[in-house]
Image (spheres, coloured by chain):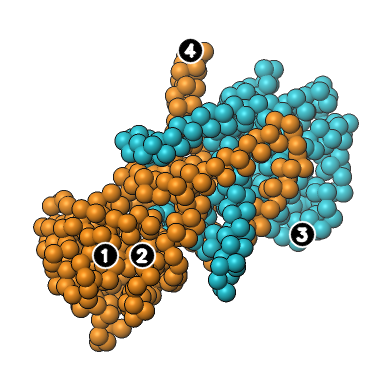
Chain colours: A orange, B cyan
Amino acid sequence: MTGEKPIFDRVGLIGLGLIGSSMAWAMKRRNIAGHIAGYARSEQTRARAMELGFLDSAHESAAACATDCDLVVLCTPLGVYRQIGEEIAPVLKSGAIVSDVGSTKVSVINALSPVMPEGIHLLPGHPVAGTENSGPDAGFETLFDDRYTILTPLSDTPTAVVDRLRAFWEACGAMVEIMDAEHHDRVLAITSHLPHLIAYTIVGTASDLENQLAREQADETDMVKTSDVIRFSAGGFRDFTRIAGSDPVMWRDVFLNNREAVLEMLGRFSEDLVALQRAVRWSDGDKLEEWFTRTRGIRRSIVEQKQAGTFIAMETGDDD
Amino acid sequence: MTGEKPIFDRVGLIGLGLIGSSMAWAMKRRNIAGHIAGYARSEQTRARAMELGFLDSAHESAAACATDCDLVVLCTPLGVYRQIGEEIAPVLKSGAIVSDVGSTKVSVINALSPVMPEGIHLLPGHPVAGTENSGPDAGFETLFDDRYTILTPLSDTPTAVVDRLRAFWEACGAMVEIMDAEHHDRVLAITSHLPHLIAYTIVGTASDLENQLAREQADETDMVKTSDVIRFSAGGFRDFTRIAGSDPVMWRDVFLNNREAVLEMLGRFSEDLVALQRAVRWSDGDKLEEWFTRTRGIRRSIVEQKQAGTFIAMETGDDD
């Protein structure tokens, strides 16, 4: 697309972690932004971003970064959105789009709507993509390719604004879906937030158990076998550890900002877990087999819809 | 190793799924077995195995397969071990080793010990390796490379027998660990069985929710958006679906055969989940962040110990 007019003349990225840096790389891959401005709280991150070369300019405040931008994207943990919104509000260019990449959407509207000036278009977004790594070195230009980015327009968002941000994300490689914020938060609560909470839980449970097993073995024999849980993690556990290796502050804020939907999904999950627990306790093999057969069908749908990730062909040694 | 004497003159594989076929390929990669005999219940599987070329002979009964073997390995679901043990007992060669690849070990000893004749060495094993795929086409020669295989000798198993089976598995590419069956069952309950039960649960929960959401949307709008859960699975859910895509009969038998340890681990997990649920409900950000930071450290240990799998470098788009 080089040579064509960029979709936005100036884009400001507030936050330069995995998502912010990947957005910059994706913009640079094609001629999506005339100028990419960036801000991160830490001087070290800003310097590293300039060194890596994914920004055209780094700024010492969110307001300086947002000045004159046609698109400003918040890429920080959700907990600081309100504060950033207040900081950038006075400098926003008339007609600018303010968006974000947060994993919850109702709370984003609640945090930013009240502080956005007249003539600014708030259009929250969520690229459903990521890795377990974080920080400016973690970004790469293909992160959003063939992944969904969800946009959640407000009732008064002009269609032209939605179309423009859709074109932006499609140029970054993504498939774009439009939905309302409440629906987003429920769907993501089950597909992302609850899986993370469960993974965080079991990895903590296993860690406690491992410490206990190590103490027991130390009592019984001369040889302390530590790290059994880690060594035998190829049996399924390591997939959970990868999820549970995600950024702690980002995820703390996700749970604080999508509490109701997460608690609802957790309630549904707990009911089902108790039912399967009962089947195990009472050796109800038919119920177990029937349940496991149904879930296998869902996995196949994901593979067919090409959302399974590249590891399908590459990976070995994952369950049994 | 071609040219050297094989470790076993004749190996019999009872069951030709992912693990059985991978063992055959691993044996063929080096000169580990003079002859590989195989048995599967289905005629189609036996024919396919011969067609793929990983067996030297296919047999129509477990007994025919086990005849004259120096090593017989059960690679079937756990539920049929006892029956197979009874079938092969009369034909086992004196001094033969009978082993297996099942995911539980106490139940294997309980099932097979009573039916093994004098002069036969029962030495249960468990390669902690696998993929979500099953059947004779799923096998590959590198499945066990750099993965642990656990052997759980009985109190009267001669050291020479353990050493020989250890050499066999090491030649197949595995790292071998010796532990008692009870310890195995507890460690695997937390690293493998509980993760599978949880993954099976949440995928079922999500499937039910998706059906409900689709119905609600059909009421509200003209457009039914099906498969939201599948389409946005890159947010974490898809890792669970991969685990929940594992063989239903095999896993039914795992839970039926390691009930006590699984229920114990489930109890520990549920306590921790309730604690985190409470932290979400009461917006206890400090507790969440502290827990998530601890689990991230465990992930790093797995990566450092090279048990993270090949997807670390390859994969994109997995959480957020």
| Chain under numbered label 4 | A
| Mark 4: amino acid | Asp
> Residue at position x 62%, y 23% from top?
B182
B269 sits left or right of B58 in the view: left
| Mark 2: amino acid | Gly
> Residue at position x 71%, y 55% from top?
B136
Q: Say what secondary structure mark 2 lies in.
A: strand
For residue A219, the mark is 4
Q: Say what secondary structure mark 1 lies in.
A: strand
Q: Nearer the viewer, mark 2 or mark 3?
A: 2
Task: Work out whether disc 2 and disc 4 sit on a shared chain.
Answer: yes
For residue A73, the mark is 1
| Mark 1: amino acid | Val
Q: Nearer the viewer, residue A225 or B53?
A: A225
Q: Which residue is mark 2?
A: A125
Task: Report, in whole angstroms, how far the alpha carbon at label 2 lies from the one at label 3.
Answer: 50 Å
Q: Is residue A231 visible?
A: no
Task: Report, in whole angstroms, how far the alpha carbon at label 2 lies from the one at label 1.
Answer: 9 Å
Q: Are marks 2 and 1 in contact (CB under 8 Å)?
A: yes
Q: Position of residue A217 (x, y in %)?
A: 50, 18
Task: Work out whether disc 3 and disc 1 sit on a shared chain.
Answer: no
Q: Which residue is mark 3?
A: B48
Number of other residues with Cα within 10 Å of mark 4, as a class: few under 14, some 14 to 19, many 20 or more:
few
